[in-house]
Image (cartoon, rainbow, N blue to C red):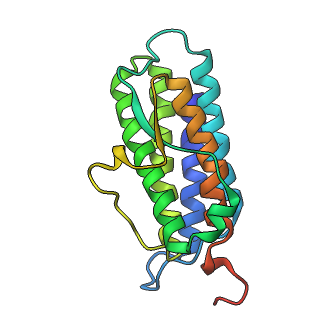
């Protein structure tokens, strides 16, 4: 059942992206400005968090991982330019992906593996959404785990909670204010 739900969600997202990008045309990606796409990712993150909370065996992290801070000081956020905001979000997404890769090697529960696989695919899809919005790609430095604005978690449930909160917070703020989604941009 979990795999069917994850596949159905991924298929729905793929159909949305393919419809919006009109494959076969050499035009750039059309902006994906509909926040329902992000809400879909948030709901799947909540589902994974709920599954992890109820998981009893084979669901732990083997080591602590570095994750992005999820709190947002709106005054500080608003003072950052779009590039700085995008870099903060992309660094956070990269940290989450690294953390979920670590979790994937730690977890032995097969039901949780499908949630983790789906989460990793969703993080990659969010990066594709950012590209569709002409947000400049940013790859954090190799030592990004030592960056300001990060912290370490040692429980899988904490990692999943950070994931949900990061999507609901900084990713939502970035997507909702993307220049490509402004009415005056063609």
Residue 127 visible within the image = no
Figure label count: 0
Tell me the quadrant of the picture where the N terminus can be found. Answer: top right
49 left or right of 110?
right
Residue at 64% across / 55% down in the picture?
Answer: 38
Query: What x and y, as percent, mark residue 41?
Result: 61, 48
From the viewer's side, name the closer residue of 140 and 35.
140
Query: What x and y, as percent, mark residue 76?
Result: 63, 62
Residue 89 visible within the image = yes
Query: What x and y, as percent, mark residue 166?
Result: 59, 47
Tell me the quadrant of the picture where the C terminus can be found. Answer: bottom right
Q: In this view, does 163 lie above or below 31?
A: above
Farthest left residue? 142
Query: What x and y, as percent, mark residue 8?
Result: 59, 44
Q: In this view, does 175 lie above or below 146?
A: below
Q: Is residue 116 above or below residue 75?
A: above
Q: In this view, does 150 lie above or below 33?
A: above
From the viewer's side, name the closer residue of 32 and 169.
169
44 left or right of 59?
right
50 left or right of 28?
right
Residue at 69% across / 51% down in the picture?
Answer: 39
134 left or right of 32?
left
Residue at 65% across / 45% down in the picture?
Answer: 42
């Amino acid at each position: 059942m979990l795999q069917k739900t994850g596949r159905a969600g991924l298929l729905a997202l793929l159909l949305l992206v393919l419809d919006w990008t009109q494959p076969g045309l050499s035009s750039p990606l059309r902006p994906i400005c509909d926040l329902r796409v992000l809400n879909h990712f948030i709901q799947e993150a909540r589902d994974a968090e709920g599954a992890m909370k109820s998981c009893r065996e084979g669901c732990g992290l083997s080591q602590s991982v570095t994750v992005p801070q999820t709190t947002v000081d709106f005054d500080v956020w608003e003072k950052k330019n779009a590039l700085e905001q995008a870099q903060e979000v992309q660094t956070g997404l990269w940290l989450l992906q690294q953390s979920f890769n670590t979790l994937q090697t730690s977890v032995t529960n097969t039901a949780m593996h499908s949630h983790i696989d789906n989460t990793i695919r969703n993080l990659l899809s969010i990066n594709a959404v950012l590209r569709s919005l002409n947000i400049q790609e940013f790859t954090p430095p190799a030592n990004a785990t030592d960056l300001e604005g990060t912290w370490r978690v040692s429980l899988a449930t904490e990692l999943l909670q950070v994931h949900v909160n990061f999507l609901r917070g900084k990713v939502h703020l970035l997507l909702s204010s993307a220049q490509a989604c402004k009415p005056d941009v063609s």
